[in-house]
Amino acid sequence: MEKVVSGIRPTGNLHLGNYFGAVKSFVKMQDDYDCMFFIADWHSLTTHPKPENIQQSVRTILAEYMACGIDPQKAPIYVQSDVKETLELYLFLNMNAYLGELERVTTFKEKARKQPDNVNAGLLTYPTLMAADILQHRAAKVPVGKDQEQNMEMARKCARRFNHIYGVEFFPEPQNFYFSEKALKVPGLDGSGKMGKSEGNCIYLRDDDKTITKKVMKAVTDSGPQEPNSQKPEVIENLFTFLRIASTEDTYNYFDEKWNDCTLRYGDLKKQIAADLCSIVAPIRQRIEEYSANTELLDRIAREGADRARESASATLKEVRRIVGFRS
């Protein structure tokens, strides 16, 4: 079976962007691939979270992973910081990464713009840590969202460069994995961009029906269609994206027809989106609450996942040390 690895930063609760963009793919993959999923707590240090936030968020993400359907017996779930081998590979990869190419990464430039007083080295070398997360397991595929495509290209570049420098064919070049023809970008509720915690435009998997409905009804719109069969502006296309991912095809076609004949009422559209999102989130939210109450189970699953991840990473690092010229 091909090996697959992916992770999510523990910076609060999972939202619908995480769920539709990544976690649903994880659930589908665990039966057909050799999967490992991790909680990227080291990555979260680029924003300087408080210690208590890291510890609580790790358990939160673990409970939410399982509530979404990931089975740790099929696909180990581990905490990034429990696998110390990652840091050693991160070091080796950084030694072969160049300042100019790291500074050109779009996600680095965006983060540097958003947090100008905290442009740290970890932010700059985020792609090489991500590459270490992937390459330590010699993964063939990585489920990614649109915003991670450039980081994935950096991971492939790290693999190619290592192989070229040392004259080996050791690391495979990990490929982006999508369940559709292109990466799914779940929009935010503020009219533009993607759903993200830092943007404050999220619907979380822990939100109750009332909260979800309130958020959807406040979503940005415009004055309505002015001409039949006109192109939808971005703010409206975003709402139709929610229909596409949460509603039936018939429902989507119904509202699309309403747009095309200029009879669409945004209130009706939002109520439909809210109802369909609530039906998706409600059973997940219930399972999250059940898992969150069992901290002993969560800690055991994290320990078992770390054991399996370290076994995989240790085998890789043993060979990397030999290839680079260090004793095992």
Image (tube, rainbow, N blue to C red):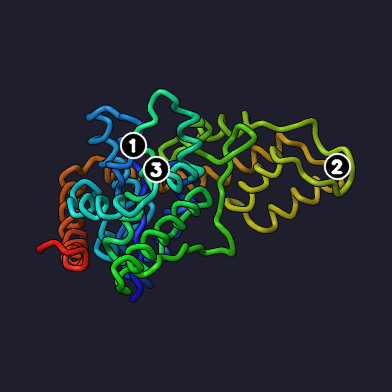
Locate the C terminus by quadrant: bottom left
Q: Residues within 10 Å of mark 1 (few under 14, many from 20)?
A: few
Who's the residue at 37% across and 38% down the image? 123
Instruction: List the residue tagged with mark 3.
Output: 285
Disc nearer the start of the sequence (2/3)? 2
At label 2, the amino acid type is: Cys
At label 1, the amino acid type is: Ala
Who's the residue at 85% across and 42% down the image? 262
Q: Nearer the viewer, residue 155 or 103?
A: 103
Instruction: List the residue tagged with mark 1.
Output: 121
Mark 2 secondary-structure assignment: loop
Mark pair 2, 3: CA separation: 37 Å
Q: Nearer the viewer, residue 198 or 17?
A: 198
Locate the N terminus by quadrant: bottom left
Mark 3 secondary-structure assignment: helix
Relative placement, left or right, of 60 versus 257 is left
Q: From the viewer's perspective, is residue 7 above or below residue 216?
A: below
Mark pair 1, 2: CA separation: 52 Å
Q: Nearer the viewer, residue 314 or 303?
A: 314
